[in-house]
Amino acid sequence: MARSAVVQDQSSHVRSISLPSRDHLFALRVEQEVYKLRTCVVSCSLSSQEMCNGLRRLRDLYDCIEELLHLPHNQQALCHPHRKEWLEEELDGSVKVLDLCGTLRDKLVTMKEHLQDLQLALRRRDTTSIESRLHACIRSGKKAQKDIKNCRRPSKQVSSKSSPYTAVDMDSDLSIVVHLLMEAREIAISLLRSASRLLSVSRRPKRKTSRWSFVSNALQKRKVASEEEHKETSDMGNEDFSLCVSVSYDCISCKDVDGEKVPKAQDRLETLKAKMEDLETQLECLNRRLIQNRVSLLNILSL
């Protein structure tokens, strides 16, 4: 009799052990992905492919956060009166990130239009038109950088705020959701900053530059070896834009509108335009996720 009581006691004790829930394990896995994504973002200058992959992974992260936000126990915890202030701040931060994402996307569209005009001028082999379109590209790039910088400043201030949640006693699941929301916002700002570098261009060469010196200087760091040629077409950043401008200017300075430099400039512009289109697509997808995330937070706030 005593033995059966002991067995019953032990079995009751075993049943009382609480294992991590499936939702909690999912949240932990998402948190690990956030760490990997953040490490990738801050590690170095990103190439075109790395930027687009980063934006895809960020989009997937927001999908995961959306799933966590729809869990009943998280919604109940987030709509608590003590957490209303933080939710409102997070909503304010989401507007800033949406603004930054939308501005960058719009500037990419504008820059792509200028590149198409430049391609058309190169096809027509019109020196005056080529120079005019180049100046338009450079002016557009400078204006885009200025607008994005002005748009970026408040976003940076929002990302540096500490959450009022730190002083609130939360369960571990909710603390993970809060952490993911804040991390996703900061990663989004970092990625958008990196992507905006595509729109920058180095100062155009002085017209007194000799006919060969400018292009040789521009291409010196990228010459020889097929590996370097492959890297040249796969990387993205202000170097790609500057190099396109350099080769196009060389068509003017060398009066080579009927030579081999025009096809080379056209190829570079086509590659750059394709990279911009891919980036534009990823920004559009991210923009939709940001809107969806904002709607979910608004719905929770209204509970």
Image (cartoon, rainbow, N blue to C red):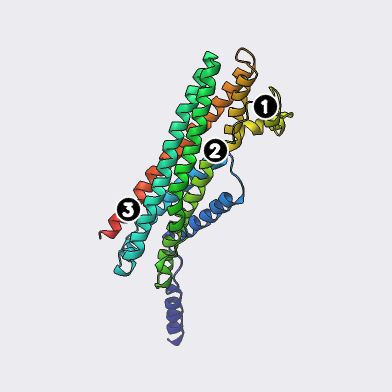
Instruction: State yes or no: discs 2 and 1 in contact (Cβ < 8 Å).
Output: no
Cα separation, mark 1 vs mark 3, equals 57 Å
- Closer to the camera: disc 2 or disc 1? 1
Task: Say which residue appears at 42% left-offset and 74% top-offset.
Answer: 16
Q: Residues within 10 Å of mark 2 (few under 14, many from 20)?
A: many
Amino acid identity at mark 1:
Thr
Can you tell which quarter of the image residue 200 is in? top right
What is the number of the mark on residue 86? none
In the displayed structure, 255 sits above or below 72; it is above
In the displayed structure, 3 sits above or below 298; it is below
User: Which residue of the protein is positioned furthest toward the left in this rendering?
Assistant: 303
Q: Which sits in the foreground, 91 or 259? A: 259
Residue 172 picture location, percent across and down:
44, 67
Q: Residues within 10 Å of mark 3 (few under 14, many from 20)?
A: some
> Of callouts 1 and 3, which one flags the residue occurring earlier in the amino acid sequence?
1
Residue 62 picture location, percent across and down:
42, 50
The residue that mark 2 highlights is 200
Circle 3 SS class:
helix
Residue 179 picture location, percent across and down:
45, 61
Cα separation, mark 2 vs mark 1, equals 22 Å
> Of callouts 2 and 1, which one flags the residue occurring earlier in the amino acid sequence?
2
The residue that mark 1 highlights is 209
Q: Which sits in the foreground, 120 or 209? A: 209
The residue that mark 3 highlights is 296
Circle 1 SS class:
loop
- Closer to the camera: disc 3 or disc 2? 2
Cα separation, mark 3 vs mark 2, equals 35 Å
- Image quadrant occupied by the C terminus: bottom left
Can you tell which quarter of the image residue 227 is in? top right
> Of callouts 3 and 2, which one flags the residue occurring earlier in the amino acid sequence?
2
